[in-house]
Image (cartoon, helix red, strand yellow):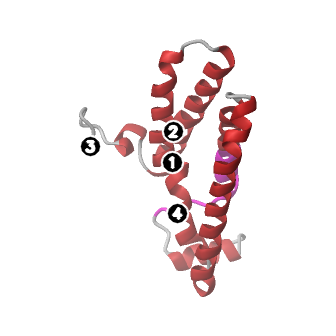
Amino acid sequence: MNPFGVTAPRFFGNGRTAAIRAASVAVIALAGVAGIFWTGGREELLLWLLIGFIASFAFSQGAVIWVYLAEVFPTAVRARGQSLGSATHWIMNAFVSWAFPIVAASSRAAPFAFFACMMVLQLAVVLAVYPETKGVALEEMEGELTDPAS
């Protein structure tokens, strides 16, 4: 709960709609950060855009991966699948953390523009490919993912 009495899920809506809206705010915030670095204008908005990105990402794509990893793998391989997914996630985080200062040294705007584009791509993939898991039993999800015709 924030000082205004509004929780993020109620502010953005519920379920998948909330995640899509929060991700959209995150993309706009990142694009705004890139724009500030490219133009050098409106620097007073930089901190607020970064805070907006962090908050929106935390309620959308940042949290979804962990829930999805727990739901998407068949029961027989769920533990190994989650381990592989988690390891891949952290290895890529390490790579991004290593590459960010190198890229930002040549262009402060480029990494933020890249991140915004990648969030748009991820959002498109999620909407087009990933099934809704809310209210679906794990066994049902396993059936849907192994036999898409059902």
Looking at the rendered structure, which numbered label has been put on residue 66?
Answer: 4
Amino acid type, callout 1: Ser
**Picture coordinates of residue 127, whole percent (x, y):** 64, 50
Q: Secondary structure at mark 1?
A: loop
Q: Is residue 22 magenta?
A: no
**Picture coordinates of residue 49, whole percent (x, y):** 50, 28
- Looking at marks 3 and 1 on the same chain, the residue that comes earlier in the sequence is marked by 3
Q: Secondary structure at mark 3?
A: loop
Between the residue at mark 1 and the residue at mark 4, the CA separation in whole angstroms equals 11 Å
Q: Nearer the viewer, mark 1 or mark 2?
A: 1
Q: Quadrant of residue 112?
A: top right
Between the residue at mark 4 and the residue at mark 2, the CA separation in whole angstroms equals 19 Å
Q: Is residue 144 visible?
A: yes
Query: Label 1 neighbourhood size at 10 Å, few (<14), some (14-19), many (20+)?
Result: many
Q: Residue at x 41, y 42 (%)?
A: 13
The reply to whether the C-beta atoms of the residues labelled 3 and 4 are less than 8 Å apart is: no
47 with respect to 107 (left or right) = left
Q: Residue furthest bottom?
A: 76
Looking at the rendered structure, which numbered label has been put on residue 60?
Answer: 1
Q: Nearer the viewer, mark 4 or mark 2?
A: 4
- Dot 2 corresponds to which residue? 21
Query: Label 4 neighbourhood size at 10 Å, few (<14), some (14-19), many (20+)?
Result: some
Query: Label 2 neighbourhood size at 10 Å, few (<14), some (14-19), many (20+)?
Result: some
Between the residue at mark 1 and the residue at mark 2, the CA separation in whole angstroms equals 8 Å
Amino acid type, callout 4: Trp
From which residue to which does the magenta span run?
A: 121-134
Q: Residue furthest top?
A: 41
Which quarter of the rendering shows the C terminus? bottom right
Q: Residue at x 54, y 13 (%)?
A: 42
